[in-house]
Amino acid sequence: MPNRVLDHARIPELPNPYFGKVRDCYDLPDNRRILITTDRISAFDRILAAIPFKGQVLTQMARFWFENTDDICPNHVLDYPDPNVVIGKKLEILPVEIVVRGYLAGTTSTSILTRYKKGERVMYGHEFPDGLRDNAKLAEPIITPTTKAFDGGHDEPLTADEILSRGLLSQEQWQTVSTAALALFKRGQEMVARQGFILVDTKYEFGIDADGTILLADEIHTPDSSRFWLADGYQKAFEEGSRPPSLDKDIIRAWVDARCDPYKDPVPEIPEALIEETSRVYIDAYESITGKTFEPDLAGETPLARIRERLSPYFSAA
């Protein structure tokens, strides 16, 4: 269904655009932001492909989690005018991305498994013993913060001490976001465990609104921001030293990583069959974790036409 792919959401009638790796955003003059989640898939600091219905899955899955965690931390959401669109409070995004990890896992250059296998034993201010195996469960979840790279830059590892000494966050801000992140992760782990999954690791972004309140932004516990393993398959895979069966974009990351150095080399063209399989993984993740049936919005000639129509009331914003 090629005409159902939203590879961009460039809408010239909307003001103050900002185009990220996955979201195309527009700032309204009243401290609101329009965030449109496209079907682009990003890893290794680059865009790899566009996956049908991925943007709707991400928006609706994040909505599920925002609604199930607002007692822990307030979030930026004001309205959902379309399944791919959030109207949120405009925030000053904090310059630190909060990554919480429960397992020694990952394929990117900042993941603790990648660095552990290179011989590092002190990472992000945490010490790791020798002898850990790939995908081992950590004694307790840890925060591995990175710089928040804007405009396509690279995230860089940080420690809590570096965050404070460099003035990236105040002591109070760090306390607020680190406490919230661990509580959000715990809630996520508990909820997905009831559905037969493991929340392995995830990232959170926080921002400050016009009143100075720290809010959860962007997305939460989606296949883009999180790694999910099937609980039933984890132990066997761990004992065999293989990758546990997952419900996240690792399927694309692993394919690319096996064929090139994704940080330096051109990425091979991703087969259509793998793109379709990835779309199914995203939809399965939504249905399995939320317990809801995914209903694709097929209104309009294309997803972009549908979104343009539903956002037309904002075209007069100056």
Image (tube, rainbow, N blue to C red):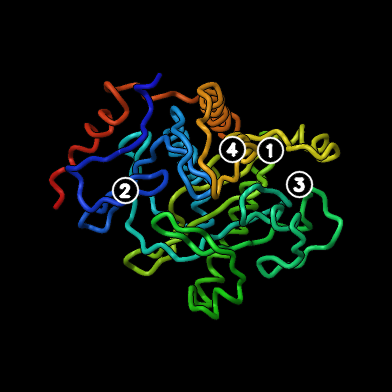
What's the amino acid at mark 4?
Val
Callout 2 secondary element: strand
Task: Determine which residue is flagged by label 1.
Answer: 229
What's the amino acid at mark 1?
Trp
* Crowding near the residue tagged with mark 2, few <14, some 14–19, many ≥20 C-alpha atoms within 10 Å: many
Closer to the N terminus: mark 1 or mark 2? 2
Callout 1 secondary element: strand
Q: Is residue 148 above or below residue 33?
A: below
Closer to the N terminus: mark 3 or mark 1? 3
Towards the viewer: 101 or 191: 101
Q: Is 216 on the left-hand or right-hand side of 35?
A: right
Q: Residue at x 73, y 52 (%)?
A: 104
Tell me the tag on residue 25: 2
Task: Determine which residue is flagged by label 4.
Answer: 256
Residue at the farthest front position: 265
Q: Residue at x 54, y 49 (%)?
A: 264
Closer to the N terminus: mark 2 or mark 4? 2
Dots 3, 4 in contact, CB < 8 A: no
Mark 3 or 4, which is nearer the eye?
4
Residue at the farthest top position: 1
Dots 2, 4 in contact, CB < 8 A: no
Q: CA distance from mark 1 to mark 2?
A: 31 Å
Q: Is 97 on the left-hand or right-hand side of 244?
A: left
Dots 3, 1 in contact, CB < 8 A: no
Callout 3 secondary element: loop
* Crowding near the residue tagged with mark 1, few <14, some 14–19, many ≥20 C-alpha atoms within 10 Å: some
Mark 2 or 4, which is nearer the eye?
4
* Crowding near the residue tagged with mark 3, few <14, some 14–19, many ≥20 C-alpha atoms within 10 Å: many
Residue at the farthest bottom position: 165
Task: Determine which residue is flagged by label 3.
Answer: 135
